[in-house]
Amino acid sequence: MDLNWMMAVAILLPLIAGILVFIIRQYHIRGLIVILTAIALIINSIFLMLHGPDTYTPTSHYWGLAITILDYAMLLFYIYAGLSLKNWLVLIFALTQIIPLAYWEFGMGASKALEEIKPAFVFDHLSIVMVLVISIVGSLITIFALRYMYDHEHHKEIEKSRQSRFLFWLVMFLGAMNGLVMANNLLWLYFFWEVTTLCCFELIAHDLTKEAINNAARALWMNSIGGTAMILAMIYLFAKGGGTAELLTLESIIKAGGNQAMLLLPVALMCFTGFIKAAQFPFQTWLLGAMVAPTPVSALLHSSTMVKAGVYLVLRLAPAFAGSYLGIMVAICGAFTFFAASILAIAQTTGKRVLAYSTIANLGLIIACAGINSPLAIAAAILLIIFHAISKCLMFLCAGTIEHLVWSREIEDMEGLAEKFPVTTFITAIGILSMFLPPFGMLLGKWLALESVFAVPLAAILFVIASAATMVFWAKWLGRLLQVLPRLGRKFESLSLSYSVPLWLLVLGIFVVGIGVAPVYQRFVSFAVNNVVAATEAFAAGWNIVVPSASVAAGGTGALIGSFPVWPLYIVFGVAIVLPLIFVTIKPGELRPVYLCGEQVGGVDTDEWITTADQKAKLQLGGFYWQGATGEGAVNPWFYTVSIALLIILFAVVVGVSL
Amino acid sequence: MNQWWIAIIAIIVAPIIGGFLAGIDRKITARLQGRYGPPIVQPFYDFFKLLGKSRIATSRMQFVWIYGYLVFMITCVVFLVLKLDLLLLIFLLGFAGISFVLGGFSSKSPYSHFGANRELMQILSYEPVLLLMALGVYAQNGSFMISEIMKPGAAPLLPSLWPIFIAVLLVLTIKLRKSPFDLSTSHHGHQELVKGIMTEFSGPYYALINLTEWYEIVLVLGIVALFWANPLWVGIIIALAAFVLELIIDNIAARMTVGWMVKFTWAVGLVLCVLNIAYLYLIKGGA
């Protein structure tokens, strides 16, 4: 396919489809458009992968003009939003963006130089990995959203349907993300960055409750701080480039960055922008607040878009801080978020908040890997991006499905889900196990990260504690789902196709990409790693992942640093869990009541017992959350203090080096 | 082919050694308590008797997870004898532990839930120490492979990793479910938590749990032995001495609370590991 068309489909098609679904208010036609767009995006992303790295600059100058106009339109809208919501933080941070931007473009005359930047888009293998993740995982979410939003509005008995509007923002989001990961011109990167912020704001506010609007405003002002930092970085680069656009592309920063200490400050500012988008401490609250939105939004924000833009930018800039103290500070900041969010997740009673903290934690892990910046760490980071997108997307879609089955997001209300909805529970269990246990991809990524982390020992210590906390909060949640009474004869529930197709496809994805991780790495991810850091090692041997030592990589013989036999471990998983799941059966006569000190009332499957004064009482069990030790009230003051201090140290180090 | 035979032999021999160790455990414990104690082979008698009992269930999934517990524990032992990746072995041990926890959560039983939640806290206590042990080995050897630890001519780990070794002894107490950390379940009767996480398991599946525990004893003692892998007999003597030490501690210590366990293992175990790794990092310059 022609490159023009591929770019158009990746970036503009979602926008056009979004406008179409906004206009056409008929459920089935709208659904068809979304499904066709999803298919087109997926096929297009595969074509793009086959096409390979390239550069692209639109021939018409009007695109540059359109982007400039839309930039100001968005910022004016933020000002309007700030004024109408009476949210001064939104207003202030909209002004801190628009005033420097206008002064820079017109006062300092940068707009002329910006229009001449070539190439406007550069996509290498890292971009292609991101486009695939966005197009495939993101598209599945839009399909899931079709039925979900229908049920959502029915349950809430909303009279005037706002589904069209919702789908408009949701579908358009994918186009903005595709543009973001391919943009080379910093102003265009900034534009797509702002579009994702805007989509995020609109989607969080969708339900128009007071809480939704407040949380949307918080997401907006926090990300506007990031936007401000990016504008400052651009102005600094413009000034350092002697009033030319020479340094205003990602390519040139990456090329020059490693050698020029003065470029560390703008790189640090842009990493800071990425931190905010990736909801790193102390900016985690916007992503937690985003939970009020309908679940497809959370799924999209957490798996393939928005937060992944943050980690993408840090990863993209990794060559520019290689070997500097900035890199070490990025690693420590990321590792601290991984640690803090994992600890906080233990105390959460709401399913979606557990997922949110887990996302924040994993993003911290990815950012830490980017900071460590060795070939092994970068390989870990990119694999984690891929596997996290699949697994976390599945988890959110499961959370959404469960929410529409039990109409609650509380983990305690999911008690005994295995009894009522065995199919959903099965898929959720796969999702949970794939988040933290071997042989699944997330664990593979974490294992690679741990094998590389000794370069920054402080991060290593945070990693291992976080890793242990991760096991606790996932197992605890899964445990609540599994609790059943001794009873046989469960019926499988039937789910709408709009739910079940994305769910099963993601389960399939976990296993296919998981088992095939070594070939996928060798043929595909290794090139993306090479785009970030020159890797001489091959981390895959046949179907297995291996970590060779430096002497082996140099062509000599020597010992391995580590090895991960992939398919043998999937066979172990099959023998340990899948086969028993299929073949273990129990007969009704084998069932017994649980041990209640002989105080049971009635038959086998009863959970009533005789309590004090011979009263009958229903047995009630609850989960442990240890909120006194790991709750937000107990630990947040510490976590905020440390994370703010870390950011201050980060900038102090950078300014110290730059001066 | 050779590797397959090693794996098969280990799968057969490990539970026999584990069973005998369990028998020795009961004998020594009895002597320490002034009793005569059962014969050394008593655990095997118990095992076969349990296998022959009829099966009773409170849920289907509890059986599934027990297979997960057993098979992943066996995989860990195979990883150890095939001298594969130590860090990955620890993650696999994590799957085994989590399977067991989920088995406990699978029925609506207050005692087994109690035990499962405590077992999770035990994992939270020992997992970071084990992971840091793997990092300590990396700091020393530049590799996570067990084959590098056991390579002929490799220097023993104990002289440079002795603080981590002490932390691993703490983990050993938790893994063997010995006082003061026999929190999720206990080998001694008359406890307020009944049999904790194992309350709802009986007959053949309880036998499988015993079998898994035998593999586990061999595994954790094997990990202890890695601290002096050249020559290996020194390491084995150290591991057996550690085992006897655990039995003595078990009999002279009272059970503590869960919160105390997490605080204690983190405050002592983690700090020892951190100091050890920091020292190695500084003298080796982060290589």
Image (cartoon, rainbow, N blue to C red):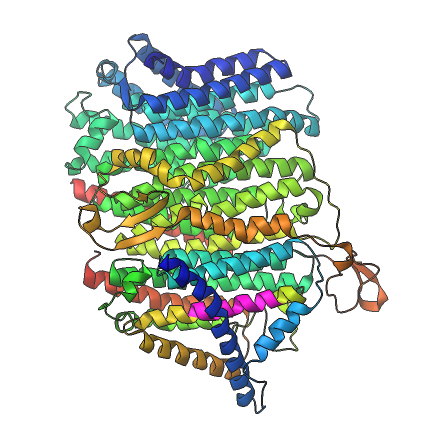
Relative depth, front residue between B127 and A156:
B127
Q: In which quarter of the image is residue A233?
A: top left
Q: Residue at x 24, y 38 (%)?
A: A533
Q: Is residue A92 visible?
A: no
Q: Which residue is situated farthest in the front direction here?
A: B1
* Quadrant in the picture for the C terminus of chain B: bottom left
Q: Is residue A500 visible?
A: yes
Relative depth, front residue between A486 and A33:
A486
Q: In this view, does A125 lie above or below A654?
A: above
Relative depth, front residue between A15 and A401:
A401
Is residue B214 rendered magenta in the image? Answer: yes
Q: In this view, does A655 lie above or below B117?
A: above
Q: What stretch is highlighted in magenta?
A: B207-220
Q: Which residue is drawn at 56% across and 51% down?
A: A577
Q: Position of residue A166 (x, y in %)?
A: 56, 22
> Which SS type dominates the magenta stretch?
helix
Q: In this view, does A148 lie above or below B128?
A: above
Q: Position of residue A593 (x, y in %)?
A: 76, 61
Whether residue B173 sits left or right of residue A130 in the image: it is right
Q: Residue at x 70, y 30 (%)?
A: A155
